[in-house]
Structure formats: C-alpha cells, structure tokens
Image (cartoon, coloured by chain):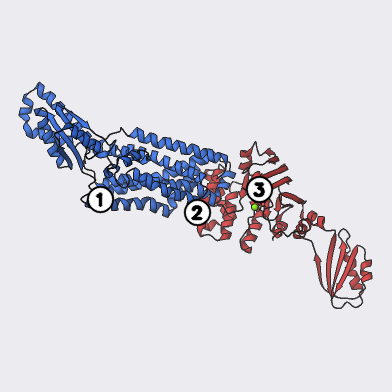
Chain colours: A blue, B red
Amino acid sequence: MRILTIMLKEIKEILYDKNVMAIMILLPIVLIGILGFAFSSTSDIKLGDIKVIYTDEGDTILSQGFDIFIKETDKMGVKFVEIKDVSKGISEIEKRTYDGYAFLKGKDITFYKNAHGDIKTEIAESMIDSFVDTFKGMTAIASQNPAFLKNRGDINLNREFVKITSIDRKVKQTSFDYYSVTMLTLIILYGAMSGVFSIDMERTKKTGRRILASPVKKYEILIGKVLGVTFSVFIQALIIIFFSKYIFGANWGNDIITVFVIIISEIIFVVGLGVSLGFIIKNGAMAQGLLNGIIPFIAFLGGSYYPVKEMGSQFIERLSNFSPITWTNTAIFNVIWVGNYQYVPTALMVNLILAAFFIVLSAYLFRREAF
Amino acid sequence: MKIVRMKDLTKRFGNIIALDNVNLEIEEGEIYGLLGPNGAGKTTAISIICGLISFDRGEVYVFDKDIRKDAEFIKKNIGIVPQDVAIYGDLTAYENVKFFASLYGLKGKELKENVEMALEFVGLSDKAKEVPNKFSGGMKRRLNIACAIAHRPKLIIMDEPTVGIDPQSRNHILESVKKLNEMGSTIIYTSHYMEEVEAICTRISIMDHGKVIAEGTKEELTSMVTDVNTVYIEIGSIDGIKEEELKGIKGVKDVEIKDSTIKITSLKDVSNFDDIIHYFISKNIPIRNLRNEIPDLETVFLTLTGRKLRD
Ligand SMILES: Nc1ncnc2c1ncn2[C@@H]1O[C@H](COP(=O)(O)OP(=O)(O)O)[C@@H](O)[C@H]1O
Ligand SMILES: [Mg+2]
C-alpha cells in the first residue's frame, strides 16, 4: 500500500514535468524523423538493402527453384550476387562485405553468416530457411507424385516462392523502421535521469527527511521509486512507439508483447542505474553530466545512430558487445522482423542482471545512510 | 505519561559535539520550547526524537517507548514540520498533504477528510488545487505545517517554522500552534526568536553548544538571572524628592535619579509597588509615566553565555 503511494507520487512528479516529457517524447520523435529522412534520401547510405552472395553447385531442381526465388527477392531489395569460388565466398563473409553467403550443394543450401544477430543477416537467413523448407516439401511431394511439378509448371512454382518471401509482411527495413527502435532504446537510457532525480530531488527539496520520519520502511521507498520511475518511462516509451507507428509507419512486428517485455527489462536496468547514481553522487547535476557523457557512447556502440556493422570496423563491432543496448536492439529487431526469439533471453539476462546489480547497490547505499 | 524523555543524550558529528549530555523531560499537553542560537543542537535533538539519526550515548524515550526498539510506533504518532520547507513544488497542495498522510497509513474517506481538515486549518483550502511553486514563502510554510498534521499526531514537532516570513504569516502560525495544542497535541517548538518562545511556550529549554543551559517556565528562567525588579517613574519636577526617603521603602535596593526619571530597583520577592506609588501621592507629585522592566529570555541568554541569541 505504501509502496503504491510512493510509486504514484513518483509517476505524478515525472508525468507532470513538462520539460522531462518534452525531452523524453518529442526529442526521439523528432530524431526518428530527421535521421529517417536523412538516411532514406542519401544514395550511398542505404540502410535497408540486404546483400547476399551465393555459389550454385546445386542439382538442377534446386538451381531452378533458387533462380526463381532470387528474382522475386530482388524486387524487395534483397540482392543476390553469384560467386564461383566457395573459399572466396567464405572470406567475403569474414570481411563482412555481405550480409550472408548461401552455398547450394546437391539438394541442400548452407548459409554462412558472420555478424551475430545482425538484422539483415537474420532476414536473409530466414528467407533462405523458408525457401529450403518449402522447396523440400515440394520435392518430397514431387518424388511421390511426379506429375505434380509438371502439372503446376513454373508459374505455380513461382507463386509458391513469392509466398515464401512474403511470409514477413515487410522484408526491407526502412530507416524509419530502424530509427524508431534505436531511438526508443536510446531515449530509454536517458530515463536514468529520472532515476537520478527521484533520489536527488528528495535531497534538494528536503522531502527525503520527511519521508524517512514517517513509518515507511526504506525498502518500501526504494521499491516504490523504482516501480514508479519504471512505469513512467514505460508510458513515455508507449507514446513513442505509438507515434513512430502512426506518423512514420514504423514496423513494430506482430508480437508487441515480447517487445514490451524486452523494453521493460531495459527500463528497469536504466532506472536501477539512475537510482544508484543518485545515491553515489550526492549532486544531481553532476550525475546528470556523467550520464550525458556515457549514454551517447553506449548508444553509439549499440547502433543507435548508425548500424554498427555498416561502419565496417571489426574493433567497434567487438566493442559493441559490451553495450547492453546492442543486445536489446538485436533482440527487438529479430522479434519484429524474423519472429526470431533466439536473442530475447540474452537481452533479458543482460538487462536484468545489470538491474539487479544496481538495485542491490542502491539498497546497500540507502541502508547505510539517508538520501 | 512523559511524551519525551532524554537521558544523558550525546551525539557527535566527527569532531563536533552536537548534543552534550542532554537531559530533557516533556509532559503531555505542553508547548515545549527549544530556544537557542544557530548550531545549538536543536535540529539534532529533534532528528533523534523522530528516529532520523542515531546517537552515541544516552537514552531516548518517546511516548514511554525506547526509540531504538519502537521506532515505528513512535514515528506513527509524530508529525514533523521541518526547518526547511519540505514539499513537492510540482504537486498540488492537496496532493502534497495527501501523499504524506498516506505514508502514515491513512486511506479512503478518513484520508480525504483529514487532508481537507489540514488544509482548512492552515487556511489553504482555496489553494488546494494549486502548485506550491506559485506560492509565497508564508504559504509554503503553512503547507509545510499542513503536511505534518493531517494524520493527527500526538506529538507535533516544529523546527523553526517561522524563519523568513512576514509578520502576518508568523502570527498566523503562532496562533495555529496554540490551536493545535488546544486540540490535544503536545508541541515541541524550536526557535532562535525569543519573543516567539516567550509568547507561546509553557516550558522552555535554552540550548547552547549542544548543552541545555537552563530549563523551566519563562518566570523560572528569568528569575534565575535576576533577583531584582526595576521600575522607571517619570515626573514633572524632582523638587522635594529625597533619595534617602525612597531608599527607606522596604525592599528598595537602589535609586537613581536622572533628569525627570527615577529608576528604582527593588528585590524581586518583596512587593512594594503600593508603597512606592504612595510615596509620590503623599508628596503630591503627579506621575507622568511609569514603566516596569521585566527581564526577558534574551537577558537570560546574555547573562548565561555572555552572547546574544542572534549575532
Ligand atoms: N549532518 C551533520 N554533519 C556534521 N555536522 C552537523 C550535522 N548536522 C548538524 N551538525 C552540526 O551540529 C551542530 C548542531 O547543529 P543543529 O542541530 O543543526 O543546530 P540548530 O538546529 O540548533 O541550529 C552544528 O555545529 C552543526 O554544524
Ligand atoms: Mg536547526
């Protein structure tokens, strides 16, 4: 009950604050607009194009099917480039010049990839996976009933593959799709400020003493605050998602609940970070300065401003593993674009372990002394 | 029941001794004053009563319960008006009072009624939906009080509640302290303004450098520093007045005549006022003005410490 009281007070303070709301909601929307337009009009920076190389050593039926497949996908912005030499193909992937490498051999396709969880690679892989599945299904039927393929002919086969490639409503990611996600997860990082101020403000307004003079327990205060700030930032996130979807037509996929779960885990981590900074640095402006210094760096490594893989630096790419936002962004993109949940547990784990660490740290600091 | 009992209470902040062997007893129903200059230890003493800070030595009982064992019960029954205004500038006056009252477990209808009552009490009912950021200093101070009383505490502690406000708001606050006391709350009132403490407190501790240097009612305190009573009498002409005759009146210790004013100092416990007046009447000398000088707490503090309360 008292936790709820504190939570509600925290929510009111944040949502009543017009400056905070403007920064947290308007800024990302404006940024999505600016970055979205900027990167959709420049020709040399095309975020959306997926480039895959392939080597065709497949049997006649597979080759034939694959040809139809790549003609269809070409219309959607997925470019397949043939390479004769297998070892050259693999080395291209190591160099990251392409998003993936499909090697057709006999009746099978092997897909080589490098960037872990990169959304373009994942989209390419999932398309080839569904091609292989459908293809195998059809050849199985054909081997039972050889008349099947003859009767349906190329045109029908063609239609089947069109169906494969349109399993995901959209295949090509626009820059608006990209920045709607990365600006959201970026601005959530700035939610740490709300965490800092939920502590610092009790200090500067002297209300902390008043709360501590009441019979409320310290753990109730801490939980109430973390929940309250988390809820507030989530409301801000919801508004951003809503606007990006309906103003910029950003794709948020078919499973928004999972996206919410990932986002909430990020928010709890960020709020925990902010609250513990509020306790460690007994000066709100200084804590704010520190966050202003760190966040752009974390965000840069997480691909918030530009996809890390496109920068073409293996060093930065390796460094990006240390940015919690990398995992969050990867998980969200994979859920939205390929319905791939593989990266969700990692993202949740990274966020929740960090959250637990910072909340325990806050509890320890709060126990030792007042605000 | 003793509302507060402190025994040999000592509190250090590093090298500073904020409280030095303080002994205090506050009875139910009192308006108890803690008077002392800045840094005397008033806020520290209060913070300990509220369970906000720990202490190094001694014992503290509030409502006959040990603060180290029954902090929750004690906190529930105290309302504190902090020295610094402690309210949320962006929440409305109503939301501020409601928030703090909720922390004390009030809910539903009782919560609503008590919040309205508290705002009414400090005269802010018509500002309930406005935010304190737009309030004057006096209004903020009044809201600061409302936030401490909505849960109807047995003990209300006010830490310098009138600092930095206009005389009108100050009077309003002093009146409300008396009213809260009449409504049944014991009050602890700290101040470095001796006029305030003199005006409302039933008993007073004078503090300095972490020590209680004197304790008692206002009369007890003033009689500590002076055993004399001084009267100034202004007359038209001093012709016919004999110093020796005045000194002959019982209890009179000293007489000074300066221009047309006579200063007569008498022993405090001898009542000789009638005799002095009678002397002038019998000589047919009209009295133009008469002034009785009563020593105040400032004098007490000055006498005990050699310093003024406010430097
Ligand atoms: N948190 C603190 N840390 C260090 N010194 C303190 C602290 N609080 C009070 N003091 C010191 O203790 C003494 C008493 O302070 P305080 O109780 O605030 O006095 P008052 O309320 O009578 O003005 C002062 O010398 C003050 O500087
Ligand atoms: Mg003080």
Q: Amino acid at mark 1?
A: Phe
Q: Disc 3, ligand 1: is the CB inside 8 Å?
A: yes
Query: Which of the chains bears the disc numbered 3?
Result: B
- Is residue B268 or residue A168 the one in the foreground? A168
Residue B150, x across and y down, in percent: 58, 48
Front label number (2 vs 1) = 1
Front label number (3 vs 1) = 1
Q: Is residue B147 left or right of residue A135?
A: right
Real-space CA distance between mark 2 and mark 1, rounded to the nearest whole angstrom: 45 Å
Q: Which residue is mark 2?
A: B92
Decide: few, some or many residues near mark 1? Use Cα within 10 Å; few <14, some 14-19, many ≥20: some
Real-space CA distance between mark 3 and mark 1, rounded to the nearest whole angstrom: 61 Å
Does residue B59 appear in this view? no
Decide: few, some or many residues near mark 2? Use Cα within 10 Å; few <14, some 14-19, many ≥20: some
Same chain for marks 2 and 1? no
Does residue A240 appear in this view? yes
Residue B145, x across and y down, in percent: 60, 53
**Which residue lies at the image location 22% right of the left edge and 32% below the top edge?**
A112
Could you say which disc has been placed on residue A39 in the image? 1
Q: Amino acid at mark 3?
A: Thr
Query: Which of the chains bears the disc numbered 2?
Result: B
Q: Which residue is mark 3?
A: B44
Query: Which of the chains bears the disc numbered 1?
Result: A
Residue B86, x across and y down, in percent: 56, 52
Secondary structure, mark 3, is helix
Q: Disc 2, ligand 2: is the CB inside 8 Å?
A: no
